[in-house]
Every structure is written in structure tokens, then in C-alpha cells.
Image (spheres, helix red, strand yellow):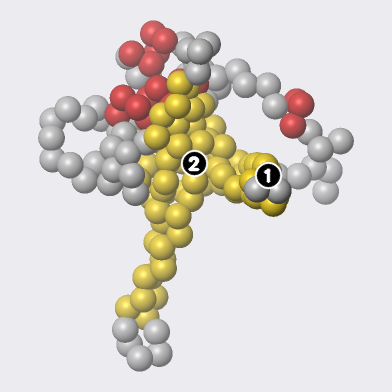
Amino acid sequence: MAGTLNKVMIIGNLGIDPEIRRFEDGNAIARLAVATSESYTNREGQKVTNTEWHNVILRKGLADIAEKYLKKGDKVFVEGRIRTRKWEENGQPRYATEIQADNLTMLGSSRSDDSRVEPKSYDQNNSHNSAKAEEPSPSVKNNEDDSDDLPF
């Protein structure tokens, strides 16, 4: 095989409202906690549900969209790639594995208010276009260069 693949797709519900962090240059990062669940019946006939929590990072325009439209309980489809961050805390190495989102689709809400837009899909590669962020289209992108992330 000539290459490698780092691709993640999840559908789940937000466990908390998006955490937004803004920078001096106007860019933003949003952190989402997305829960996915699997259910099965054990030997005793009882239904068992296992929930996995995923840390999702949205950048630039996707962060703006999350801030504007997403709330705890909302169902989302996230497509992206796995990233692991490393830092030191009290002299000990620490790691965090996250999903770096490239696409976000809002699938629905657990709320019954009328302030929601229809489900839309957003793409990280064009989300810097503020006109499109105001008037969401099915595909919005951002031009993020990951060439310095190559392991060779």
C-alpha cells in the first residue's frame, strides 16, 4: 500500500455546550465533548449500554458555527482525523487524543425551540468565508495547511 489513512467519522450527542476560545487575531477554537453509545444484551438478558466520550476540536469558521448553533444535547456528525497532543505538567508527560474536525453536520436538537436552523453540513476548508457563515450553505471550507505536521 502506498499511503496511510487517518479518518474518523462519528455521530453522537454533545455532553456540554461548546467551549469557545478566541485569540487576538480573531480566530477561534471550539472544544466539543461528543458521546457515542453502543448497546447489547448480556448473558443474563439485560441491556447494557457503553458510552464513549470523544474530544472534538473545531477551528476557525467551524468554531464560529458551533458557538452560534450548537448546545448540549444536540446530535452532530463529525468527520475528521485523530490528533495526539503532548505537553508536560509537573514534570510528567501528558497526552490528549482528539478528533480534529474537517466536516460538521448538525443533525438535530433535543430542544424544542424554534431558534434552530435546518440541519446543515459545514466543511473546514471554506469556513473562513464570513458571507457563507452568515448564510450557511451545504458545503463550507477552510484552507488549513498541515504540511508541517508530516512525520518525516
- Give percent across and percent down for residue 111: 17, 42
Residue at figure coordinates x 48%, y 50% from the top left: 54
Classed neighbour count for the residue bearing mark 2: other residues with Cα under 10 Å, few (<14), some (14–19), many (≥20): many
The label shown at residue 88 is 1
Q: Is residue 26 above or below residue 56?
A: above
Residue at figure coordinates x 75%, y 25% from the top left: 147
The label shown at residue 56 is 2
> Is residue 106 rendered to the left or right of residue 129?
left
Residue at figure coordinates x 45%, y 26% from the top left: 21
Is residue 37 visible from the viewing direction of this image? yes
Classed neighbour count for the residue bearing mark 1: other residues with Cα under 10 Å, few (<14), some (14–19), many (≥20): few
Q: Nearer the viewer, residue 91 or 131?
A: 91
Q: Is residue 96 above or below residue 80?
A: below
Q: Mark 2 belongs to which amino acid?
A: Val
> Is residue 143 rendered to the left or right of residue 111?
right
Query: Could you tell me how many numbered marks the image carries?
Result: 2
